[in-house]
Image (tube, rainbow, N blue to C red):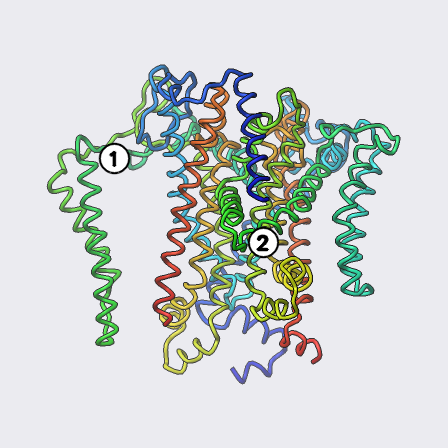
């Protein structure tokens, strides 16, 4: 070992990381072989032999020696290039493309709120106020923008929403609406009143035991039964109700985990100060519990964001479904792979950045002594 | 106050539902289960419970749905576990290339929706592979298998009469013997410090059980070979394209979560433990097997059981590729055909909640057994 470390640093790195033992060398060669088998053909397909130009599927075909139209060997990104407004904003906003600034503005506003929460210029208390305010106000602002009727703009009914816009609406509304419900359920599950506790346990266990698809099916069939005869419920609203119910059970478990991780002394101290249940919960224990449960909530949000694609099954045109529909149209038949890869890249972008953000948040919120010492060093 | 409030809410919901059901003339009785099902169910991979169009009743549809959900779960769990374990261990490999490859694989498949992956496998990835297979007339015939562009046909073992129950009984006896042997070996190691080659013995026990079964019931065991009838092959076991896509997709997706569990579990073991093993002169493999993994398993197993539950729940995405699981043929097709919303929804919920309850029971039992050992 000693002799090697005197070599060039790059050689040393290679030795330690790739060729430190015979087994290691074999593994390196196998991995390299796998990469060699996969990467060049994939690059060829996706970049070098791909079509980026043109306005219809003829751009991705050529006429062979028999005079027949044949698909070019590479990917046909023309499909994505021509259809992206649909993928991002849905059919209505593609028809009324001059209105597409509305979903964009709603999205930018959401990013602004997240940025304000992440920036260090606000104190903890201000961040709390921003978050609470945003949770209440933002859904209405977003609805006003997307629907447009309140602002005197051309109306886009919920049934007209589609693409990535609908995916984001379902996911964010699901998590926002599920949050207060989840807090109540978590508190109820720790309650000493058997009826309250029983309800919470039943609700949480029932909806955690069911697949979301099953719940979406049930919601789309059964929900109308629970309302007075003749009530019409929008498909999107049915999906949102199902998603909210589903998500509330997961949020509740995340928050319950946080509540039981708050040291007992905190509860006792609140009692010693003469605080009642509500005062001690809102001022002492819940803020600490929420902080502890943020990573878990974030994870279940990422899960939910991926799961919104399931509304495809009940026929909503969210990102995945609108791509699927486009790839089955007579013009773009056979270009599913390109569409799926675009969808995968979009989902990956959102989920991966959220998981990076949540890891960062976890580190920042870790106010334990060890973490603070580590920051000072 | 809470009680009064919820009772009122319940009253409103129930009265609305009753009014709606009366309005749509839906009866809440199980009588429709005896009615003949009016639709065909796509081919079963393992026809444990047969379905005949025009004869089978809705009760059969339900059983087949449950059976198919269980089959895909039982297929998916071992493959996802093996792949997940491999990925989890390689994510911690000292080899740079291998580590990055498996980490990349896990990140890609964890951060995209399972539904998207299933659609990709089923509609974009597998079809070119099937298309490259030879047509029916030029099928590849090897070892009783038939491979052609219509799919894959495997020879199926058939058990006549009571041989199926006998086989189950023999395997159960072997399983009990294996558990007793493992306990004995553990006790012996605790007392004398010398273990037994338990793994080899257990394989031997099962081989012995199968041999005994063949000796007594061998004449009732047959093989159903795929045969050419008309334009296509029939008979044998036929893994449909749907089950292959679903199995593949569930395996890949679930394995990434298991890999994260494995990685986290191994990292949670204090490095001092591994160093102590090194000081005792244990090799890398033995250190992993005797020191790190037994401790890591306590951390790995509970979340992995919940991933198995997730796999079961995710198998409901079968509807996207057309595999006949319970959500697809029962909650989807049967409900559409009969309109018996209440009963069908109720039965579906019961199935999933039973699976859920069994899983959490298993987790609790495991956690308890681990806690006793911890002292």
Q: Position of residue B284 (x, y in %)?
A: 41, 72
Report the front residue among B238 and A45. B238
Q: Position of residue B303 (x, y in %)?
A: 47, 56
| Quadrant in the picture for residue A190 | bottom right
Q: Residue at x 29, y 37 (%)?
A: B143
Residue that numbered label 1 is attached to: B157
Using the image, determine if residue A109 lies above or below residue A148: below
Using the image, determine if residue B289 lies above or below residue A348: below
For the residue carrying disc 2, how many other residues have a C-alpha within 10 Å: few (<14), some (14-19), or many (20+)? some
* Residue A247 as seen in the image, left or right of residue B271: right
Residue that numbered label 2 is attached to: A187
Q: Residue at x 40, y 66 (%)?
A: B293
Using the image, determine if residue A249 lies above or below residue A125: above
The furthest residue to the right: A152
| Quadrant in the picture for residue A80 | top right
**Mark 1 touches mark 2? (CB < 8 Å):** no
* The disc label shown at residue A227, or none: none
Say whether mark 2 and mark 1 are on the same chain: no
Q: Residue at x 41, y 53 (%)?
A: B82
| Quadrant in the picture for residue A357 | bottom right
Q: Position of residue A192 (x, y in %)?
A: 52, 55
Q: In the rendered image, is residue B248 in sight?
A: yes
């Amino acid at each position: 070992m000693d002799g090697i470390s005197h070599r060039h640093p790059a050689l040393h790195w290679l030795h330690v990381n790739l060729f430190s033992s015979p087994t290691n060398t074999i593994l390196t060669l196998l991995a390299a072989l796998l990469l060699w088998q996969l990467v060049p053909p994939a690059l060829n397909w996706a970049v070098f032999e791909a079509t980026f130009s043109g306005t219809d599927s003829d751009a991705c075909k050529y006429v062979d020696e028999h005079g027949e139209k044949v698909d070019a060997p590479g990917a046909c990104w023309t499909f994505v290039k021509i259809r992206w407004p649909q993928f991002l904003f849905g059919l209505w906003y593609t028809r009324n493309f001059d209105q597409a600034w509305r979903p964009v503005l709603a999205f930018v506003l959401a990013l602004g709120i997240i940025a304000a929460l992440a920036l260090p210029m606000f104190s903890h208390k201000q961040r709390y106020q921003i978050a609470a305010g945003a949770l209440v106000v933002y859904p209405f602002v977003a609805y006003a923008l997307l629907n447009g009727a309140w602002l005197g703009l051309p109306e886009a009914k919920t049934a007209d929403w589609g693409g990535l816009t609908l995916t984001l609406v379902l996911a964010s509304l699901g998590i926002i609406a599920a949050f207060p419900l989840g807090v109540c359920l978590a508190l109820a599950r720790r309650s000493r009143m058997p009826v309250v506790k029983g309800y919470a346990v039943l609700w949480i266990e029932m909806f955690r035991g069911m697949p979301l698809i099953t719940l979406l099916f049930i919601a789309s069939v059964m929900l109308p039964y629970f309302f007075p005869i003749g009530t019409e419920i929008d498909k999107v609203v049915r999906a949102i109700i199902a998603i909210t119910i589903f998500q509330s059970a997961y949020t509740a478990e995340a928050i319950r985990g946080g509540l039981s991780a708050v040291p007992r002394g905190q509860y006792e101290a609140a009692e010693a100060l003469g605080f009642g249940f509500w005062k001690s919960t809102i001022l002492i224990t819940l803020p600490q519990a929420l902080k502890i449960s943020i990573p878990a909530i974030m994870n279940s949000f990422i899960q939910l964001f991926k799961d919104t694609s399931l509304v495809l099954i009940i026929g909503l045109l969210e990102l995945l479904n609108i791509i699927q529909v486009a790839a089955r149209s007579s013009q773009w038949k056979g270009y599913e792979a390109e569409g799926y890869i675009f969808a995968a890249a979009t989902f990956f972008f959102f989920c991966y950045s959220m998981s990076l953000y949540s890891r960062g948040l976890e580190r920042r919120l870790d106010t334990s002594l060890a973490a603070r010492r580590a920051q000072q060093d | 106050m809470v009680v009064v409030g919820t009772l009122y809410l319940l009253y409103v919901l129930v009265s609305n539902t009753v009014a709606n059901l009366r309005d749509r003339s839906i009866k809440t009785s199980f009588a429709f289960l005896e009615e003949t099902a009016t639709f065909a169910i796509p081919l079963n991979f393992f026809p444990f419970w047969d379905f005949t169009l025009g004869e089978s009743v809705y009760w059969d549809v339900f059983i087949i749905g449950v059976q198919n959900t269980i089959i895909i779960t039982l297929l998916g769990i071992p493959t996802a576990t093996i792949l997940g374990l491999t990925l989890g261990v390689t994510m911690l490999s000292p080899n740079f290339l291998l580590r990055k490859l498996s980490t990349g694989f896990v990140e890609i498949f964890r951060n995209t929706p399972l539904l998207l992956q299933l659609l990709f496998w089923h509609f974009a990835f597998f079809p070119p592979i099937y298309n490259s297979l030879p047509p029916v007339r030029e099928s590849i015939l090897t070892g009783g298998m038939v491979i052609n562009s219509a799919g894959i046909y495997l020879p199926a073992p058939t058990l006549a009469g009571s041989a199926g129950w006998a086989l189950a009984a023999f395997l159960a006896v072997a399983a009990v013997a294996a558990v007793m042997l493992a306990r004995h070996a553990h006790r012996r190691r605790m007392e004398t410090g010398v273990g037994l080659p338990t793994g080899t013995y257990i394989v031997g026990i099962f081989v012995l059980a199968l041999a005994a079964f063949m000796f007594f019931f061998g004449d009732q065991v047959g093989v159903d070979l795929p045969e050419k009838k008309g334009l296509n092959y029939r008979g044998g076991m036929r893994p449909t394209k749907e089950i292959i896509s679903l199995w593949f997709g569930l395996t890949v997706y679930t394995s990434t979560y298991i890999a994260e569990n494995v990685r986290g579990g191994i990292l949670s073991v204090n490095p001092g433990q591994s160093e102590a093993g090194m000081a005792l002169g244990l090799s890398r493999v033995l250190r992993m097997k005797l020191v790190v993994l037994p401790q890591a398993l306590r951390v790995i197993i509970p979340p992995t059981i919940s991933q198995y539950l997730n796999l079961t729940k995710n198998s409901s995405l079968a509807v996207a590729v057309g595999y006949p699981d319970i959500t697809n043929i029962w909650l989807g097709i049967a409900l559409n055909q009969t309109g018996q919303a209440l009963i069908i929804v109720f039965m579906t919920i019961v199935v999933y909640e039973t699976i859920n309850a069994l899983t959490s029971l298993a987790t609790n039992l495991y956690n308890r057994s681990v806690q006793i050992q911890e002292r």
